[in-house]
Each structure stands twice: as structure tokens, then as C-alpha cells.
């Protein structure tokens, strides 16, 4: 199975492992506790080894920004806090690429201009924000079977998007765990 991973999945996964990411997930969702969300993400990550999984450079950028905001809050009022938060968030993005993506064989795909244009057009025909349309276009471009995302507004498209005539599943980790 080909699986596309949205940024939120990585934040769910990392929030139980990275002290900087702890503040990025502070509550559960959809009748699941925070611990359950994190456990589902970890189990999903383990099951991905049996599948072709990928994400986009946009996810890496969004991850780095999330780390920056978390670090910025931690260093508020500290001399050089802003500069330290910026440097550390870039460092965490490198660790993310190395430890999470490379070691787990998650392919990070580039964002060519034609993909950005297609995503821009898609936003005019839907209620998706540009970043979600970019994630969707990446998944379509790589003929995925499933998109794992915690975003409720993204889930509304579950089975409504087709690739090569088959519906794409857009699910959270609690569903992905059972499907993988």
C-alpha cells in the first residue's frame, strides 16, 4: 500500500518522544485520550515498515515551524531566545529528516512548480487551504492509497478523491492502524 503522511501525523508521533514537541499535542481528539493518539501514531509508524510511505518537503517545513513556535514559547523573555529557537528548530528539522524519515524509509518528495499550481487550482474548487491542497496533490502524484492526517476538514474528502479509479482513504491513525 502507498501511504502519504501529513504533518500532523508526525507531530502526533513525535509528541511522545521529543520534549520540544510535547506542547504541540496537549489533548486527545475524537473520543481518544492524548496517550491513545500517541500510541496509535507509534503503532501506525511501526506498521508503515511494510508499506511504501512518503511525505512532502512541505511537511518538513511545517514540522520546523511547529518546533520553532514551541521553542519560541519556551524561550520567551530569554536573551537571544528568538535566535536560539530559530537555530534549534532547524536542527530538529534535520533530526526529523534523519531519524524519522531516512531511518524509517519514508520518502520525502519535492514540491515542483506544477504541483503547486495544481494545488492552487484545487483550492478554488474546494474548501481546502493551500497547504492541504499541496499535501493532497503530492498524494495524488504518487498514486497513494491512503493519506494519514489528523485534520478533520481533510477527512471530509475520505473516499471522495479517486486515483486510477479507486477511492483514496483519508484517515486518522486510529483507522490507519486497522487498515495497515
Image (cartoon, rainbow, N blue to C red):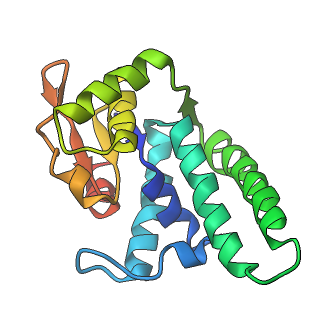
Q: Quadrant of residue 76?
A: bottom right
Task: Answer yes or no: is residue 44 visible.
Answer: yes
| Horizontal side, residue 135 vs residue 158: left or right | right
Q: Nearer the viewer, residue 25 or 119?
A: 119
Q: Residue furthest right?
A: 79
Residue 143 in view in this figure: no
- Residue at position x 34%, y 60% in the image: 150
Give coordinates of residue 67: x percent, y percent: 64, 63
Instruction: Pick the residue in front: 87 or 14.
Output: 87
* Quadrant of residue 60 within the rendered picture: top right
Q: Residue at x 25, y 50 (%)?
A: 154
Percent x, y of residue 124: 21, 32
Q: Is residue 156 left or right of residue 129?
A: left
Q: Residue at x 78, y 84 (%)?
A: 77
Query: Would you identify the image quadrant in which residue 22 lies?
Result: bottom right
Placement of the N terminus among the 4 image quadrants: top left
Q: Position of residue 93 (x, y in %)?
A: 69, 51
Q: Which residue appears at 15% of the width and 51% of the height?
A: 156
Amino acid at each position: 500500500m502507498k501511504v502519504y503522511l501529513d504533518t500532523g501525523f508526525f507531530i502526533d508521533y513525535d509528541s511522545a518522544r521529543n520534549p520540544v514537541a510535547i506542547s504541540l499535542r496537549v489533548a486527545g481528539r475524537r473520543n481518544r485520550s492524548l496517550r491513545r493518539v500517541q500510541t496509535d501514531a507509534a503503532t501506525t509508524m511501526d506498521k508503515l515498515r511494510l508499506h511504501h510511505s512518503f511525505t512532502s518537503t512541505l511537511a518538513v517545513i511545517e514540522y520546523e515551524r511547529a518546533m520553532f513556535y514551541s521553542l519560541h514559547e519556551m524561550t520567551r523573555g530569554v536573551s537571544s531566545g528568538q535566535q536560539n529557537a530559530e537555530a534549534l528548530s532547524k536542527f530538529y528539522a534535520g533530526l526529523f529528516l534523519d531519524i524519522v524519515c531516512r531511518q524509517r524509509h519514508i520518502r520525502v518528495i519535492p514540491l515542483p512548480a506544477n504541483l503547486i499550481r495544481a494545488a492552487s487550482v484545487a483550492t478554488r474548487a474546494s474548501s481546502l487551504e493551500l497547504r492541504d491542497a499541496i499535501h493532497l496533490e503530492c498524494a495524488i502524484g504518487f498514486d497513494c492509497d491512503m493519506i494519514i492526517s489528523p485534520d478533520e476538514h481533510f477527512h471530509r474528502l475520505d473516499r471522495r478523491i479517486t486515483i486510477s479509479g479507486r477511492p483514496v482513504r483519508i484517515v486518522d491513525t486510529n483507522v490507519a492502524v486497522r487498515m495497515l
